[in-house]
Amino acid sequence: MSRIASKFAHLQAQSRKALIPFITAGDPEPGQTVPLMQALVAGGADIIELGVPFSDPMADGPTIQRASERALAYGISLRIVLGMVREFRKHDADTPVVLMGYANPVEAYGVEAFARDAKAAGVDGALIVDYPPEECAEFAATLKAAGLDPIFLLAPTSVEARYAEVGAMGSGYIYYVSLKGVTGSAAIDLDEVARRIPAIREKVGLPVGVGFGVRDAATAARIAAVADAVVIGSRIIEIIEQSPPGEAPARVGEFLRGVRVAMDAKG
Amino acid sequence: MPENTYKLPDERGHFGKFGGIFVAETLMPALEELRLAYEAALCDPAFRAEFEYELEHYVGRPSPIYHAKRWSELLGGAQIYLKREDLNHTGAHKINNCIGQALLARRMRKPRVIAETGAGQHGVATATVAARYGMECVVYMGSEDVKRQAANVYRMKLLGARVVPVESGSKTLKDALNEAMRDWVTNIADTFYIIGTVAGPHPYPMMVRDFQSVIGRECLEQMPALAGRQPDAVIACVGGGSNAMGIFYDYIPHGEVKLIGVEAAGHGLESGKHAASLTAGRPGVLHGNRTYLLQDDNGQIIETHSISAGLDYPGVGPEHAWLKDSGRAEYVTITDAEALAGFHALCKYEGIIPALESSHALAYAAKLAPTLGKDKVLLVNLSGRGDKDMHTVAEKSGIQF
Ligand SMILES: Cc1ncc(COP(=O)(O)O)c(C=O)c1O
């Protein structure tokens, strides 16, 4: 069983839901990425989504764009990100790490080499935002062959025929984007989420995580009541942005603890 | 005449290994809706008739072909003919595509149109058609370009558009395109995204090519009447590649006609400051398709340079990538300095002020013509007029307004 699958199995046995924070590797500066990841785990993260910075993050709102730009100013490359995961793995053999990013840096690295090196570094899955299932059968197969989970997005606008398609190609979990728009957009339609999840879970056959627009503990708790995982990104990046130098890990950890408590109370 | 046996792209927008649909799941249904609406429109004679009516009466088509005799004489070789897209309403080929997409937007009952723009030419053309059809219009433009292109920003505002400066990334065309995509994904229900060139995810490269292909279709008819035959080569500048695809497309099955795309070499390829994606780039994925890109070793898109803002783009339409790899078209480069020389030559010898983008195609024709006999015929797409470039050219000559 993959580290992601066993994490979900373990949580399910305890009737708890997964908390999946997102940070961009190299933001606010490279030295803080591993401490931030550790602080996320200490704050109650079950899985970490680690953003690979890209010059043209078309699917991201202003907050994650800024994080990407800060990281790129330090010259953060995919190779460096893999090094960060290797460093994190030295002290944490348990928390799955999923890389989230765009196709071009992965293709520039080479798909085969990426799958091999990511696995060796201790990465568990990858979500390439601009690789819809139609364009990446080979990529998904390469990841799976290397023992990595290819993770796909579903959206409120996705037709139901799409559920089975991504279910067949993906593994690990499915990331349900809870609103129409880019990351960090404001409103989240909780009723829509509640309505959609059962059908997705049934047709996809994987745990369903919900993200885009989750900003506080109360919303996270309400999502946890209907989904298998809650993904929080832009809000965490904002906390990192607003933290005085060196304090980002502590502040992010504190925020996550509040979310964790709220989710477990409901869960 | 041979049947056009060239039938690309495939169902999912592939030109060989290029093109396709590389976008987040949130955009997939919008692209599917667009593809179906476009296919339906193509089968509707009323849609085609209205498009043709607008091209004739609003744009002023067909645009003439002009034999640049004096300049050809001076160059002492092949005869140069100019396809006069500069005479179109708004002064460039961009309007052909904007009318097609705006009519499609109206058919799809989308009252709001958005666009990205670099120099502002596509923004002006979009604002123009939005005014013409009574649509709300928002144009995204890198904040650097907003500063450099004040006159076009004002033009767009006069036409009723809202111009949004984009502060992310390099604050230029590619970032404006990212921002327009973000707007689209957020406002899909009432918004149509009018992309200005043969780039983006399927169906855009195909659709924009189809709307622009009126250029080459007219040439195919005009050349025999004017020159007694088809040209030996068709030459066009390539930014995203829409004016080039527009004039190339109907010539693709005519194997005896050379197709030559001219990219911007900026300060020279070796300087690294250029926009020659096909000549100096590597295949990758950007803005929804696979194509040649200017990128660093880590797959980050790099900043480009050209004296002409319209060619200043790190990617290129996927069909050009295919035409290059298949050998059907060849791609060459022209530096800023060479383009300027071409610009001045046309002003001086033919009384035509060309756009700096088009000046790249002219400059290559000026290089090629003297190497060929006087019986050879070159057809250059004069994609736009140079009024918008007065400031840039004057500045290069040390003149301030
Ligand atoms: C006159 C003119 N020619 C050419 C271009 C380049 O675009 P494309 O390569 O899509 O024709 C532009 C773009 O703004 C333009 O204004």
Image (cartoon, coloured by chain):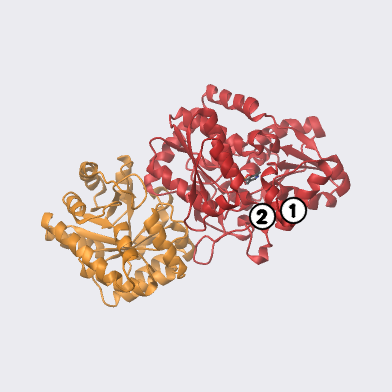
Q: Position of residue B306 (x, y in %)?
A: 64, 56
The image's mark for residue B307 is: 2
Q: Residue furthest front?
A: B401
Q: Which element type, helix, strand or loop, lies under badge 1?
A: helix
Q: Residue furthest bottom?
A: A90
Above or below, A241 relative to B327: below
Snapshot quadrant of residue B93: top right
Tell whether label 2 touches label 1 (CB within 8 Å): yes
The subunit carrying tag 2 is B
Residue type, numbered disc 2: Ile
Compared across the picture, whether B282 is left or right of B349 comes to left
Q: Colour of chain B?
A: red
Q: Colour of chain A?
A: orange
Q: Position of residue B159 (x, y in %)?
A: 55, 35
Above or below, A166 relative to B6: below
Point 25% across, 73% down: residue: A93
Label 1 Cα neighbours within 10 Å, binned few <14 / some 14-19 / many ≥20: many
Point 31% across, 67% down: residue: A243
**Front residue of A177 and A203:** A177
Snapshot quadrant of residue A144: bottom left
Compared across the picture, whether B98 is left or right of A211 comes to right
The subunit carrying tag 1 is B
Label 1: which residue? Answer: B340
Q: CA distance from mark 1 to mark 2?
A: 9 Å
Snapshot quadrant of residue A22: bottom left
Residue type, numbered disc 1: Leu
